[in-house]
Amino acid sequence: MNLQLPNEIKEKLQQDAAKRLENLSNEYKELIGKPGYTAPDTALIEDAVIALALGKNVLLKGPTGSGKTKLAELLSNVFGQPLHQVNASVDLDAEALLGHKTLSYSEGKQEIEFIPGPVTRAAANGHFLYIDEINIAKPETLPILNGMLDYRRTIANPFTGEVVKAQPGFNVIAAINEGYIGTVPLNEALKNRFVVIEVPYIQGDTLKEMLENQSQQKDEEVLSKFVQLSSDLIGQAKAGHLSEDAASIRALLDAADLSVYLPAKRAIQRAIADKLEDARERALVANVAATLFA
Ligand SMILES: Nc1ncnc2c1ncn2[C@@H]1O[C@H](COP(=O)(O)OP(=O)(O)O)[C@@H](O)[C@H]1O
Ligand SMILES: [Mg+2]
């Protein structure tokens, strides 16, 4: 991957990454993501890198299985920055973000110890924080993060009474599943604090290249058919005939892998169709598959 970056940014990045790596513990080195994201256009990665280098928070917006998590890992890799992850869910609360208190024993005495959560750890160490599916979190949880996301870069930890100040290098990457058919919108105050990078499903030659790299299926002709299948399924999803999950690149990759050992139509049934609730949608996937595979 050859990124076209402004020289100042490139130099700063290389210097910072080298300095950071020297001082990282092995535990934190393991949190640095792997490359492996294939971009539809390198500008997508370049813009995200520039935004992060300028200290902005980045919101990755795209349908499920489009590579948002992979991209966050790549960004962590480019910066040599450990990535602390939070998976948002409806029961995400302040403790899951900031940390919790627990009883511990020290020299025979009982003590209350604070175990820092991902936000506190990322901030205190100047690392990256990745919040997956941020739009799923309860509306009352996320405002906890507001202070950390704007120029203040601080957060009051209600569990310790401390004010946590983010160290230089701290940055937030968040992901939101936003498909063609509509999702839970993200609160405006929060959206305001991010630079948005759209992460679409990769298609055509880019998808073919990714499949060649990642799939166990190595047959060129079969892979080309899977690329066509993806395009057909996305078309059906955009037209509202199929739920978005049917078009996920993750599911496509599963089907391609299975097709090494199963007939492709059955692989597609297992990896894509049978996950769908609606019988008509399952039939539609089977029909699309039948037009491509014997
Ligand atoms: N653009 C892409 N580049 C590389 N891998 C991808 C890409 N899109 C999808 N994938 C594959 O699909 C899987 C799902 O990607 P992921 O990053 O978890 O998606 P998301 O976070 O958007 O749901 C990954 O494991 C990866 O193998
Ligand atoms: Mg993800």
Image (spheres, rainbow, N blue to C red):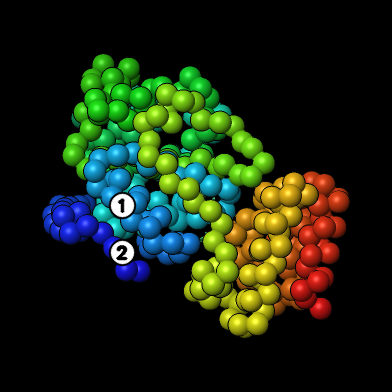
Occupied quadrant, residue 259: bottom right
* Residue 133 visible within the image: yes
Q: Amino acid at mark 1?
A: Val
Which residue matches tag 2? 3
Element on which disc 1 rests: helix
State the residue at coordinates (85%, 57%).
Answer: 283
* Residue 26 visible within the image: no
Is 39 positioned to the left or the right of 167 in the image? Answer: right
State the residue at coordinates (54%, 72%).
Answer: 205
Is 280 positioned to the left or the right of 69 in the image? Answer: right
From this view, report whether residue 178 is shown above or below residue 249: above
From this view, report whether residue 94 is shown above or below residue 13: above
Which mark, by number, is residue 104? none
Residue 75: percent from left, percent from top: 34, 54
Q: Amino acid at mark 2?
A: Leu
> Label 2: few (<14), some or many (≥20) within 10 Å?
few
Is 87 positioned to the left or the right of 290 in the image? Answer: left
Occupied quadrant, residue 56: top left
Which mark, by number, is residue 49? 1
Q: Is mark 2 within 8 Å of ligand 1?
A: no
State the residue at coordinates (64%, 37%).
Answer: 182
Residue 12: percent from left, percent from top: 15, 54
Q: Nearer the viewer, residue 29 or 54?
A: 54
From this view, report whether residue 196 is shown above or below residue 209: above
Instruction: State yes or no: discs 1 and 2 in contact (Cβ < 8 Å).
Output: yes
Marks 1 and 2 sit apart, C-alpha to C-alpha, by: 9 Å
Residue 18: percent from left, percent from top: 16, 59
